Image (cartoon, grey):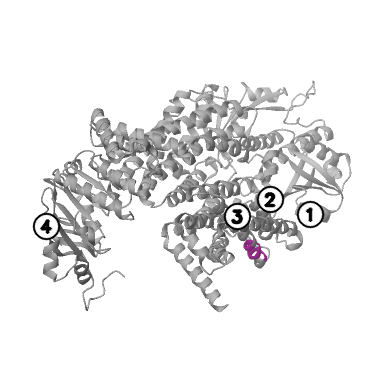
Amino acid sequence: MKLRALRFLLRKEFLQIVRDRTILGMLLIMPVIQLLVLANAVTFEVKSARMYVVDRDHGDMSRGVVTRLAASGRFVPTESSPSMSEADKEMLDRRVDMILVIPEGFERGIVRDHRAPLQLVFNAEDGAAAGVMQSYANAILTSYAGELGAEVNPMLARSVSGGTDPAPMRGHPVIELRRRGWYNSELDYRQYMVPGILVVLVTMIGTLLTAMNIVREKEAGTLDQLNVTPINRSTFIAAKLIPLWTFAMIDLAIGLVVARFVFHVPMLGSLVLIFFAATIYLVGALGIGLWISTVAETQQQAMFVTFSLLMVYLLMSGLFTPIRGMPAWAQWSTEVNPIAHFVALMRAVLLKGARMRDVASHLVALAVISSVVLSVAVRQYHKRSE
Amino acid sequence: MAGRRSALHAFMIKEMWHILRDRQTLTILLLLPLAMVVLFGYALRNDVSDVRLIVVDPTPDHATIALRDRFAGNPRFEIVATSRTGEVLEPMFRRGDADLALLFPPRFAQSLSDGVPTRLLLIGDASDPNTGSTMAAYATAVIASYQAEIGATGQAVRIVPELRMRFNPTLASVNLFVPGLIALVLTLITALMTAISLSREKERGTLEILLVSPLHPWQIILGKVMPYLLLALGNVVTALLAAWIVFHVPFRGSLTLLLLSSVLYSMVGLALGVLIAAVTSSQRAAMLGALVGTMLPNALLSGMIFPIASLPGWLRAVTYIVPARWFIVISRGIMLKGVGVAYLWKELAVLSIMLAVLLIAAVRSFKPRLA
Amino acid sequence: MNNLTRRFGSFTAVDSISFDVRQGEVFGFLGANGAGKTTAIKMLIGLLAPTSGQASVAGFDVASHADDVRRHIGYMSQRFSLYEDLTVRENITLYGGIYGLTDAEIRDRGDALIRELRLESSSNERVESLPLGWKQKLAFSVAMLHQPAVVFLDEPTGGVDPITRRQFWETIYGVAERGTTVFVTTHYLDEAEYCDRISIMVDGRIAAMGTPAEVKQRFGAATLDEVFVRLVRPPAAQPSERA
């Protein structure tokens, strides 16, 4: 009996969704736009820094520093002059990102004392970028120092990046450091972000549209009409959640296709696993939407609350900034943040080829969170309907 | 004239009541900026403080132990696993339990003392290219200093970089973020709320009543937007205070200039809101339009969180029409650099032009309603 | 119902009302705005839980057998509550299915309904395109689709032209004659004259009840209008709690 009523309700829901052009647009167009814009915009990648060179030494070694820095591709020398105030002005005008100052006596210091200072001035408005650039510069300078050491004193240990001298001196330790990065071999930041953005997509649809959909019925008064019928609340809730769940999955599929063919995100892991996780995750996301619909009276409020809530969740989920960088309390909070789990899972499965047992902890967390959220939301919904 | 003014006055008060009565939205409006300041101040950082390291050491000896101790003693690193073979790498990386792995060759110490090039392998989880490089750089530094130590002492050449971080010595991301937050809050209140409020009146039909009343159309617009303007400025001051008191975000420039620029920027937002309300047919569409057309570009394309320099060329071109982009340059300039109009005139001019264009468009789109 | 009461916090919306409605009668439920009419109706149809007291509709207690109550009643709310973006037919099919009619029943009764309302040409158009009068008639018919024992109508003729109103009341009489109890709230006091019995609610209590003639006689008034005014705004009235 109840199932039959559910069937009729589902038919109505699908009809309504398909006929509502705004929602349909959100379901079909929004994912694509989101992916294209977000994937390209959301990046902290620091490509290169424009460098102003204040060279007061004018020696071979100072030139060497500049050449080494430039050769890495990360530092682009723009202008050079002995005037610090000029350099400052350029930085203030945002024409350069950093200033390299090589003081007088640099070469002399190296040769005589085996040490010499220089100055790196970064525009730290973007603290993170400055930090990254700084570590690059450090690495380059260290390796150059090693080279200089070999020049200045042939008895010294070779540079850490591996020299090519075929006859090393006996008795002197030589370390060759090789570096390799696993996953994301092209170091394309977008590949890192796209799986996370897919999560955003799916969440938006699940939570926002659920909330709006139910509140719309509240606003129109049709909710009361349904409440008077023999349909019980659970049937009603199921009728609301199932269509959106379906659409969210469809969007996930579309998103994955775009990810694969436009962004070349490797799909190393099992897609079945992804959809399985998505199912569990969506239950929670839809539940949040249900809960929101009980506190919002108009669709605007629903939108507002949803966006604000989602924004906070997203920012705290490790999607944009690494969880490792957060303070302890924030890291704890990610344990109960379903977005954090799903993003981590997506990244692990798609980029690293993780298997079920590798992401088991995330799956369990998602299951627990989703069931708790859904039961709380359903209970709240029952209460509010009194 | 006095009659007109008091009508406008009454109208504005009514608008204020509307806003105050929607307690839910109001709470969010006030709390959200504060929450974001807290988040960005405390939680959202790009630096990596804890590198989880796997050490693969087939034949431990005094040299490998020495280098391992270097890492163990370094607060940046945490050795999460030690093993004789590299089998443990894949599962741990896949589970996300480790960030970096250091692989020693067999008979490390012997090889070093023989003077043979001894290969150390550093494998990193580079799914996040940024943190991947940074972590590898940290490790390289540790190895480099070990290398220098075991080499002939006293003769290693060292280039000592002195670092200066202009405008943000502590590299605190909150300093970077707060100027952008102001832009976000202002846009939220001006463009978004105005669009919703106006379109709601349009949908309900109460706007027609207003248009028929003795109030001039510009008075209607003014009356509607004034309360939001005040609310916006109040919110900005609150957020600034919070940022300053809790996080010691610097404020090096002129407060007056910042407030004036905020007013200018708010007006751009208001004009945008009016325009959106005029061209959309329903409240829902207005809200969506405002969200997608103003909030999203604000958050993503204005340089507020994600640096514009990282954007691909075509997106960078798009940012030129995002008003927030220009405002953020102004607010950062004032707060972090302490510069004045002399440096910021270009941005102020751009905003003024945008305001003029939007106002004309907004007024023109409302005119047909009058007929 | 018996001593039915509903409180919202410190405000008593419905204060201990008691009465019975006979089967097949057209009962008019009158009262000023905010007198508690809508609250009372909502308690009867199961949308609100009573704070105290009990009521039974169609033989079932509203508190303990809410589901049974729902199966045997129809409801037409004050605000139009069919789905505007669905077609006439789709609305019929939906509510038919919800109330457990078989596919055949849905089809047959739906056809009959459409024929009666002369909506054949617009049966596949969205409801939002229908003029208001037709919408109301459609809502009523859909409420009757599952042949309920009692039907509750909340201000069914709001904003509709006089001719349509009269047609509406003819339909109401029709269903009442066939044994359906009709519980109507209305603002139009001339409509109240059409009812078998009426009751007038003031400030949460029942101030008058009986056939229209009885009520007029008791208050010595010629029209129900007068009765109404006299009840709702008694001389030397204390200011009510709500403005």
Question: Mark 2 to mark 3: distance in Å?
Answer: 44 Å
Residue A88, percent from left and from top: 79, 54
Q: Amino acid at mark 1?
A: Asp
Looking at the image, is mark 2 or mark 1 earlier in the sequence? 1
Residue flagged by tag 2: what amino acid is it?
Ala
Q: Residue furthest front?
A: C163
Secondary structure of the residue carrying numbered label 1: helix
How far separated are the C-alphas under marks 2 and 1? 13 Å
- Write down the chain letter for disc 4: C
In the image, which is nearer the foreground, mark 1 or mark 3?
3
Left or right, residue B284 beside residue B116: left
Local crowd size for mark 1, using a 10 Å CA cut-off: few (<14), some (14–19), many (≥20)? some
Query: In the rendered image, which residue does mark 2 sit on?
Result: A124
Q: Residues within 10 Å of mark 3 (few under 14, many from 20)?
A: some
Query: Which chain's residue wears label 2?
Result: A
Q: Which residue is mark 4?
A: C19
Chain letter of the residue carrying label 1: A
